[in-house]
Image: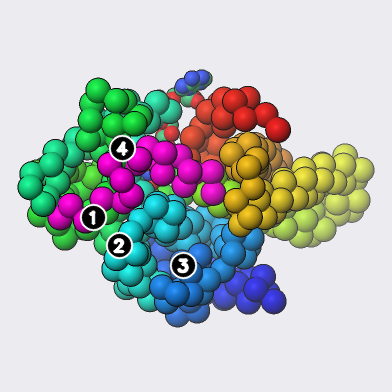
Amino acid sequence: MLRETIRSLAEAKIAPHAAAVDEEARFPREALDALVASDLHAVHVPEEYGGAGADALATVIVIEEVARVCASSSLIPAVNKLGSLPVILSGSEDLKKKYLGPLAKGDAMFSYALSEPDAGSDAAGMKTKAVRDGDFWVLNGVKRWITNAGESEYYTVMAVTDPEKRSKGISAFVVEKSDEGVSFGAPEKKLGIKGSPTREVYLDNVRIPADRMIGEEGTGFATAMKTLDHTRITIAAQALGIAQGALDYAKGYVQERKQFGKPIGDFQGIQFMLADMAMKLEAARQLTYSAAAKSERLDGDLTFFGAAAKCFASDVAMEVTTDAVQLLGGYGYTRDYPVERMMRDAKITQIYEGTNQVQRIVMARNLP
Ligand SMILES: Cc1cc2nc3c(=O)[nH]c(=O)nc-3n(C[C@H](O)[C@H](O)[C@H](O)COP(=O)(O)OP(=O)(O)OC[C@H]3O[C@@H](n4cnc5c(N)ncnc54)[C@H](O)[C@@H]3O)c2cc1C
């Protein structure tokens, strides 16, 4: 039922704008409005904080169905989970009440600010600092590649509070867009997910009350990594959706397009490609759903499964979308058809929330 609901909403209200959102590299406002109107913009927020209380699998299905028509728009529910999960996992009751309510209502979005210009895969090498000043913390630094920066009201920011201790000297904070000293860089000009703004966040003497710290001092990096164990599954969901959108489009196209006097779908060479695409996609889906169940149960092998689902599903999405372009021939290579956009959008799923090389490092360290 959930899938049917979100699919019909996505096809009616989000799909019609997907090409223009990509072409104009503009934020998918129509998608945000439609998702908020149906209470699907941050489904993971627990009911006690005013949310829909969707479990990890239901959240995956929402993201998957939005990504099937528009990958940029799927970053609304995905990044709302990424940004707020540190608060849900480690925040005080007061922080949860203060920040999850507006998120659930659709009054505010939540971003996640871990990466920096010189700290990507090696996120613990960050330089952003937070220095205690009485009942306040003062933050200074630059966060880079922050999804939905400028659009979000709230930011989970990881910053160094004790430079001697490396990852154990990093703490997490909630920073608000309206805090004095917060500003944003120009939107990055990207290959894909062009509708999702990616910007730098500048923190210039941002003075915030001490109770904005998420969890204890020095636990920020652990919270950030625990968050990714859960949210890499949402990137797998995004990859599945993008790949499904491309497969569905190609499946229809091969029945219409005629060469040598018959639909190209009658050729076995084409049928075998579609069979492989569907087989790989279904394998990725099963791994992702199984990881989502582990996320919900907080199973001990979640770290492996979160990394495996993200890595496998994103590699499959890249293959399937590239094959979809191939199945449309020259037409697939043009912006008159949606599959080249899907191929460009798929690429990011192999890069963010840890590159697929980093996922392999994580898997190797956590073999089941
Ligand atoms: C569109 C977009 C949105 C993003 N959104 C966010 C966001 O909302 N919040 C956030 O905090 N970050 C975000 N990121 C950042 C993203 O997570 C990083 O780009 C990613 O982790 C890689 O870091 P890097 O770009 O610095 O690459 P690098 O770390 O410089 O990596 C370069 C290459 O070296 C490889 N590499 C590095 N170390 C190793 C190793 N030990 N072994 C093998 N290979 C290695 C990498 O896999 C990669 O291929 C986003 C990035 C993009 C592009």
Mark 3–mark 4 distance (CA, rounded to whole Å): 25 Å
Of the image marks 1 and 2, the number of the one nearer the N terminus: 2
Amino acid at the residue labelled 1: Arg
Camera-side mark, 3 or 2: 2
**Residue tagged by mark 3?**
45
Q: Quadrant of ligand 1?
A: top left
- List the residue tagged with mark 1: 212
Q: Is residue 106 visible?
A: no
**Disc number for residue 26:** none
Left or right position of 183 against 241: left
Q: Please tell me which of labels 4 and 2 falls first in the chain.
A: 2
User: Which colour assignment does the render follow?
Assistant: rainbow
Report the predominant secondary structure element of the magenta stretch.
helix
**Among the two numbered marks 3 and 4 on one chain, the one whose residue lies closer to the N terminus:** 3
Q: Determine the secondary structure under disc 4.
A: loop
Q: Earlier in the sequence, mark 3 or mark 2?
A: 3
Question: Does 160 sit left or right of 316 as displayed?
Answer: left
Residue type at the position of mark 3: Val
Residue hosting label 2: 95
Kind of element beneath mark 2 = helix
Counting from the top left corner in percent of width and height, residue 18 is at 50, 61
> Any mark on residue 218, and which?
4
Q: Which of marks 1 and 3 is nearer the N terminus?
A: 3
Specify the segment rendered in magenta: 208-230
Dot 2 crowding, Cα within 10 Å, few <14, some 14–19, many 20+: some
Q: Is mark 1 on a helix, strand or loop?
A: helix
Q: Is residue 68 above or below residue 264?
A: below
